[in-house]
Each structure stands twice: as structure tokens, then as C-alpha cells.
Image: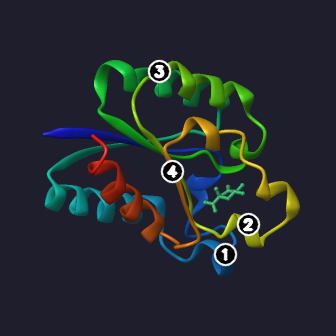
Amino acid sequence: MKKVLIINGPNLNMLGIREKSIYGADTLDSINAEIKAYGSELNIECDFFQSNCEGEIITKIHSVLAEYDGCIINAGAYTHYSYAIRDAIACVNKPFIEVHMSDVMAREEFRHISVIREVCKDVIAGFGKKSYTMALKAIGELI
Ligand code: DQA
């Protein structure tokens, strides 16, 4: 069975509470349960990791090399400025897909920049929680 890691970065543990008009009312746990169920349909085993700390995210990205076939990452605001996360993804020769729940290109200008885009195979943004399942389908075709 293929194995995919889903990483969520800072403030995504606050889904369900945080800016509901942008991110919806679902909690991260309930979204992860939906991703896991969809993974079973696609024959993909899904593991989940969330951290508000850049270093912890970097260490987890490194683990993809030995333990996973690919990775879906919503790096939250780190997307827009963390060269360290970008370099970590570049260390790992496995497919990564960048995900955002909101349509970052339609929001504030600082969100238009992604420093991880070039090291990811693709970006899926703007579909709410569905962005994750769309990314899972896409990564399933790459691994
Ligand atoms: C986000 C968009 C980012 O700009 C923001 O900092 C987040 C969430 C999204 O999923 O839409 O934390 O990545």
C-alpha cells in the first residue's frame, strides 16, 4: 500500500475556531478523518502531522525520504517566507503537493508569494477542505 504524509503547519490546529468565514467550521481532526477515508478508497495509507514550529515541520519533511511515497503540505503562513521549509522539501526526492484551503491568490498580496511552489509538483488552493482530497488524488497518480 502506498503511504502519504499530510503535514499541516502553523495555526491549522485552530481550524473550526479560526476565521470560519475563510476556513470553514470543520476541525483538523474531522478533515483528517475524511482524508483517511478517501485514502482507503484510493488504496493510500495516510499519516498526519501538525506543528506550529518550523523546525519540527522540517524534521518531519526529512522523514518522508525513508518512510513515505509522497507528501501533501499546507505550510500555512510559512509558505510565504520559509526558505528553510523550501530547502527541506528540496532535500527529499519524493513528490510534494502544496495545498491551501483558501484561494491565496485572491487574498492579501503577501499570500500571493509561495517560496515552496518550485519544489512542489503542484499546488491546489481555494477548495476548502476539498483541497486536501484533490491533492491526495493527484499524488496517488504520481507515486
Ligand atoms: C493557508 C493560507 C495561508 O496564507 C495562511 O497563512 C494559512 C492557511 C490556507 O490553507 O488557505 O495559515 O495555507
Distance in Å between CA atoms under marks 1 and 3: 31 Å
Q: Pointer 4: what residue?
A: 122
Please provide percent x and percent y for residue 138: 35, 56
Q: Amino acid at mark 2?
A: Met
Mark sitting on residue 105:
2
Is label 1 in contact with label 4 (beta carbons under 8 Å)?
Answer: no
Is label 2 in contact with label 4 (beta carbons under 8 Å)?
Answer: no
Please provide percent x and percent y for residue 25: 53, 77
Q: Earlier in the sequence, mark 3 or mark 4?
A: 3
Distance in Å between CA atoms under marks 1 and 4: 22 Å
Front: mark 1 or 4: 4
Please provide percent x and percent y for residue 97: 47, 47
Q: Amino acid at mark 1?
A: Ile
Mark sitting on residue 78:
none
Quarter of the figure with residue 24 = bottom right
- Left or right: 85 as drawn, with respect to 70: right
- Left or right: 138 as drawn, with respect to 97: left
